Image: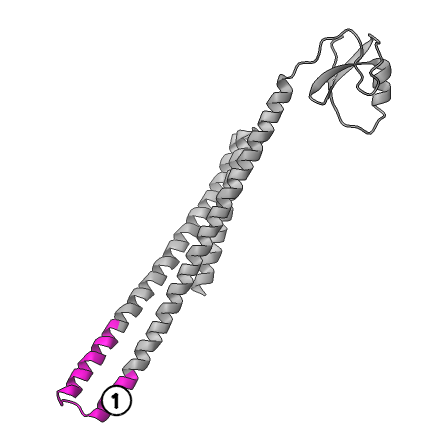
Amino acid sequence: MITKILSDLESEIASLRWKRKILKTLFNEGKISPTTFNIIDGGILEIEVAADHFREIVSNNVRFWEKITAEEMKVLESLLVEFRFLNLVGEIDDEKWRDMDIILDLGINSLKEYFNKSTKKCAGLENTMLVKRRSDQRLSRGNRAIRKHNERASNSLKGAKPLDGSHCMNPWKPDCRRTDIKLSIYYNGRFLPICRKCWSEISEKNIEWTVQESAY
């Protein structure tokens, strides 16, 4: 139960942090106002801090009971040693020793089982959290790489210059030499001037290009 609570809290905290990153990106892109950003970011941050604080409380509680369990095991093991010593020196008879041995052994094994399960669950939770963090980091790096690629492509397109030419350079009609240029299209990495007649034909075709209005 406690392990599930910790897992849910970790997922919620990760989700809140992701939301804040998205919010910051939108703000940096100028898509939301500072007022809107501060209101939403402040609300998310309050929830994140509260969830993180609660997670710490639960984690401390788990560690506390693990410590208590370990101490109880030490007490029972010490009693086991003490009773065995008393049996060997003749202070208690064999029958009483066997009874105490059974009782203490049951208690020790029960505590060991609880302690081992708790430790294993916590280790599994930590591994899950680590995998999730690494996955989020890889996703974040991938998003940054895609964003940089798009920015480079956009800058490359902005920096391209239309070809100077006094006649039409329709790639689907290379023989055209008309000079009444309507606009330029970006095709196969080049800006090509297009005359009015060719443009009326191209605009009806199911093909892709980028249009730049001509200054002709």
Residue 93 location in percent, x, y? 18, 92
Residue drawn at x 72%, y 8% is: 164
Which residue shows up at 84% across the image and 26% down it?
205
Task: Give the number of callouts.
Answer: 1
Q: Nearer the viewer, residue 87 or 11?
A: 87
Residue 40 visible, this angle: no
Q: Position of residue 116 (x, y in %)?
A: 37, 68
Vertical relation: 151 (above or below) 174: below
Left or right of 197, for residue 34: left
**Does the stretch in magenta take in 84?**
yes
Residue marked by disc 1: 98
Q: Residue furthest front?
A: 175
Residue 118, quarter of the rendered image = bottom left
Q: Quadrant of the N terminus?
A: bottom left
**Residue 202 magenta-highlighted:** no
Q: For this view, does 190 lie left or right of residue 201?
A: left
Give the x, y percent position of residue 57.
37, 57
| Left or right: residue 93 compared with residue 73 | left
The boundaries of the magenta stretch are 74-103
Q: Where is 76 relative to 186, above or below?
A: below
Name the colouring of the figure: one colour
Q: Does residue 116 sit above or below 194 in this rendering?
A: below
Q: Main secondary structure of the magenta part?
A: helix
Q: Amino acid at mark 1?
A: Arg
Q: Where 145 falls versus 213 (above or below)?
A: below
